[in-house]
Every structure is written in structure tokens, then in C-alpha cells.
Image (cartoon, rainbow, N blue to C red):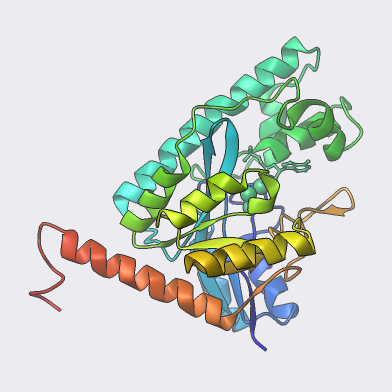
Amino acid sequence: MKRADLHTHTTASDGLHKPSENVRMAAEAGLSAIGITDHDTVAGLNEARQAAKTYGIEVVPGVEISTAQDGQDIHILGYYADDRDRVFLARLASQRRVRDSRNELIVAKLNELGVSLSWETVLDAAGRDRGPDETVGRPHIAEAMVRIGAVGSLQEAFDRYLAEGKPAYVLPPRIAPAEAIAWIHEAGGAAVVAHPGLYGADEAVESLLRDGFADGVEAYHSDHTAEDERRYAAMAERYGVIATGGSDFHGERKGRVYHGPIGWRSAGADVVHALRERAKDRRAARLSDSPAGGGIASD
Ligand code: AMP
Ligand code: FE
Ligand code: FE
Ligand code: ZN
């Protein structure tokens, strides 16, 4: 049966492999489609689409937007949004500005805590050849901390400093999940609540599905237990939304594949189809809403 891994990261954010490499690995894993869902950027999509032709599989264009509700980080996945939509691109750029200043605050906190890390070292860890639309994240900061010998592993960097509740954690001003969902819809995409099992906030997740905002929920994820998967699949069923799945592959860092290898979690071809149809509906709605009224008069 045809399977799609709908959640992977590349060098456009905090993944270790180029978009074309993710596509190649997905083809080698026998998948028929792969989602490219970088944090707050669509910079990896064109390369992935190009590679899709070479490797004969389908790329599901995506993005993973950082939001927060009641102090809890919540990630929203967007599929098939128009990645040339100027408003959407400007919104993602504003997310990256928030992220950049958050990163600087984290480095400042680390310095206060006696970890003398420079921003330059973080940039080195992230790769000097990064494009302006590519995002820097906590894994790069963790990598830089390993490089200067402040910690022995990435996990130690998160456990001692960077994870929620740790001394160098910074929660920046974030948009609400419903706002990210609206951005995705306005760009003609389908919105999915990412890895709900990581939040410990089922009420919040449920309200995003129930109140008709989100188009789906990522029931299958590398860090979900079997019980999580059953619970979220049932929740999707209850609210008539799409149950998606993906590995959240970031590559292998220091012997650990975070969150899981490509294809570790996946969804069926029917799910890809449903997401595409949902996005089509969103695009149609967008056209009929536009002042030009292009939806009816013209074809
Ligand atoms: P950011 O978006 O910059 O806040 O970074 C969040 C990212 O950090 C997640 O998408 C993961 O890639 C990574 N991450 C979060 N927690 C851990 C952890 N305990 N170990 C390794 N990576 C982590
Ligand atoms: Fe990440
Ligand atoms: Fe995430
Ligand atoms: Zn992710």
C-alpha cells in the first residue's frame, strides 16, 4: 500500500539533510510521498519539488508554524498552502524575526549562566551557507554548546538549559494556534495540529478541532504511544477531521535520530488525497472571497 511520511525537516530549518536528500531517502524507504514541513519557512520546497521528479515520488508541500496557547508551545502544520502568496510569505518572515530575537535572548541567558557561547558559534553550527529565509533553532544552539564543550550531548543541552522550564528557555511572543490556522487557510492550505501527544493539553487540541478551525490532527507521530495514536485517531473521527501521520525526521545527530527515521510514521494515500481536497476547497473559498470575484465570472 502507498504510504506518505507527512512530517520531515531539512536544512531549511533544523533538519540535517538537504530537501533533495529527504526526498531521496523517502524514495529509498519505499514511500510514495513525502511532506516537507520546515519550521516557519517554505524555503526548502522548490528544491524538494525538483528532486521529486528525479526520484519519482510526490512531494507534499508543507510548513510547521510555531504558536502558543496559555504558555504552551503548539505547532501547526500547513499543507498545500500557496508558497508564493505574498501575505503568507510576509507572515512567515515575521515568525522568523520573532525566532531570531528569541535565539539572541537564549544566547544572552546562556552567557548569564556562565556558558560563554557567541552568536557566531551558533551560526557556524547552523551552517554558514544558510539562505535568508532559512530558520535557526534550538537544535543549532545545542549543537554549538556541544562544540564549545559546555555540554556532552544535544540531549544534555536541552535537559539542562534549553527545554521548557529550564534556565535558558525563552517563550517569545507567539501567535495563537487559531491565527496560524487562519494564515494557512488564507493561503489556500489545509491546517493540521502537529504531535498533540507532546503537549499534555488535549482540551486545547480538541477545541481547535471542534470549533471548526483545524482540518486535521497528526494522530501518528514518532513520539506518540499506541494509546496516543488511538486517542487522537478517535478524536479525528469524532470531529470529522483528517488523521495524519509523520516521523518528524530531523536527521541523525550524535547517534540519535530525532524524532524518528523517515517513514517511521506515515499516512495512507487517502490522507494525502483528503488534504489536497481540503486545500482545494480553501482555495476556492479564497477566490470567491477576493474583491475581483474571480471565482464565479472567470474560470
Ligand atoms: P525551536 O523551534 O527553535 O524552538 O526548536 C524546537 C526544536 O528543537 C524541535 O522541533 C526539535 O527539533 C528540537 N528539540 C526539542 N526538544 C528536543 C530535545 N529534547 N532533544 C533534541 N531536540 C529537541
Ligand atoms: Fe525541529
Ligand atoms: Fe514540531
Ligand atoms: Zn516538526
Q: Position of residue 239 (x, y in %)?
A: 49, 64
Residue situated furthest bottom in the rendering: 1
Q: Position of residue 57 (x, y in %)?
A: 59, 81
**Front-most of 21 and 165?**
165
| Left or right of residue 219, residue 110 in this image | right
Q: Where is residue 197 in the image (x, y as percent from the top left)?
A: 69, 52
Mark count: 0
Q: Residue at x 59, y 68 (%)?
A: 244
Image position of 240 with respect to 223: above or below: below
Q: Quadrant of the C terminus?
A: bottom left
Choose top left, top right, bottom left or bottom right for residue 289. Answer: bottom left
Residue situated furthest front in the rendering: 238
Q: In which quarter of the image is the N terminus?
A: bottom right
Choose top left, top right, bottom left or bottom right for residue 44. Answer: bottom right
| Left or right of residue 173, residue 278 in this image | left
Q: Which residue is drawn at 13% across and 68% down?
A: 294
**Front-most of 265 and 110?**
265
Q: Where is residue 16 in the image (x, y as percent from the top left)?
A: 72, 53
| Left or right of residue 42, residue 198 in this image | right
Q: Which residue is drawn at 73% across and 10% down?
A: 112
Image position of 256 with respect to 99: above or below: below
Q: Is residue 91 visible?
A: yes
Q: Can residue 221 be seen in this view?
A: no
| Left or right of residue 152, residue 167 in this image | left
Q: Which residue is drawn at 45% across and 39% down?
A: 176
